[in-house]
Structure formats: structure tokens, C-alpha cells
Image (tube, grey):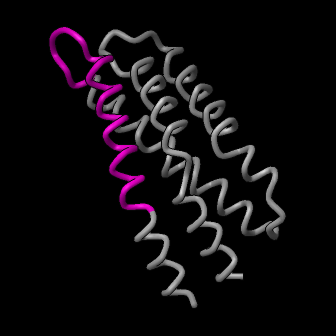
Amino acid sequence: MLAQIAAGAALGLQFAPLYAAATAALAAALAGYRKAPRYRPWLAGAVVAAGWAVGDGIRIAGSSEAVPVLVAWAIAGLVVGYGLPALAGAYVGRQVHRGTGYLSAALVAIMFVSALATLAHPIADALMRAVS
């Protein structure tokens, strides 16, 4: 069971970076400025969920893995590849005092996705070696 969850987490770390970057940037820009209305974080969450469904959700739905692998894959991909960059970007965008917080939010989200995509393969390999 632990090996299946680790395999799912390793698959989740290898998310679709193009979809993740576009989704996280849009979500961070929607919620990442000081005077964002109260509904914007909910809208950003819906954008993240929709982007994940198009980017990685289709890959997961077409997979023939066991259920624990699919669940771990879905959670890890959504949280690490899509959610964390959007949250980091929105946080940075809200800290900008003058001007274009939404641009800062989007750029931080894109850079965070690219950093995660670069580190994903070595981390996934190390995770699989540790469990094996």
C-alpha cells in the first residue's frame, strides 16, 4: 500500500508544466492584488481545479493504475503542480504596495512552476528508490 501511494506521489510530481503554468498564473493574477474582491480566491480555486482537470485530470482518468495510486497521483499533482504556485503567486502579488500586483503574482507563479518542473524528476526518482 505504501509503495502504491509513493508511486502515485511520484507520478503526481511529474505534472503537465504548460497547463500548470498557465493555470497558476491566471489564478494568482485573479487573487493576487491588494484590492481583490472577496470572491476572487474562490474564482482562482475554480480556475486551478479546471486547469488541473484539463492538464493532469485527463491523464489520470485514462490511466489503468490501482485506486490508491490514482488518488495519490491526483492529490500530489493538484497540490504541488497547481495549488502551491498559485498560492505563492497570490501571496507575493498581495505584498506589492504600488502598481501591478497581479503581474507580480502571475510571474512568481510561472517561475515557481518552472522550478518545480525542473526538480520533479529527481525528487520522484529519489522517492521511488526510497520505497523500493
Residue sticking out furthest to the bottom: 132
Look at the picture and state if 122 lies above or below 119. below
Residue sticking out furthest to the left: 98
Instruction: Give the residue at x 67% y 54%.
Output: 74
Q: In which quadrant of the rendered view does residue 132 lie? A: bottom right
Instruction: Give the residue at x 84% y 64%.
Output: 64
Magenta region, residue range: 94-120
| Left or right relative to 20: residue 69 | right
| Left or right relative to 47: residue 65 | right
Is residue 12 one of those drawn in magenta?
no
Is residue 117 one of those drawn in magenta?
yes
Q: In terms of depth relative to the viewer, which is nearer, 3 or 19?
A: 19
Q: Position of residue 77 (x, y in %)?
A: 58, 52
Q: What is the chief secondary structure element of the magenta stretch?
A: helix
Q: Position of residue 9 (x, y in %)?
A: 58, 66
| Left or right relative to 33: residue 58 | right
Q: In terms of depth relative to the viewer, which is nearer, 78 or 20?
A: 20
Look at the picture and state if 21 lies above or below 123. above
Instruction: Give the residue at x 45% y 66%.
Output: 121
Instruction: Give the residue at x 63% y 40%.
Output: 55
The N terminus: image quadrant: bottom right
How many numbered circles are shown?
0
Q: In terms of depth relative to the viewer, which is nearer, 2 or 21?
A: 21
Q: In which quadrant of the rendered view does residue 10 lie? A: bottom right
Q: Position of residue 114 (x, y in %)?
A: 36, 45
Q: Position of residue 122 (x, y in %)?
A: 40, 71
Look at the picture and state if 95 lies above or below 108. above
| Left or right relative to 18: residue 52 | right
Look at the picture and state if 94 lies above or below 73. above
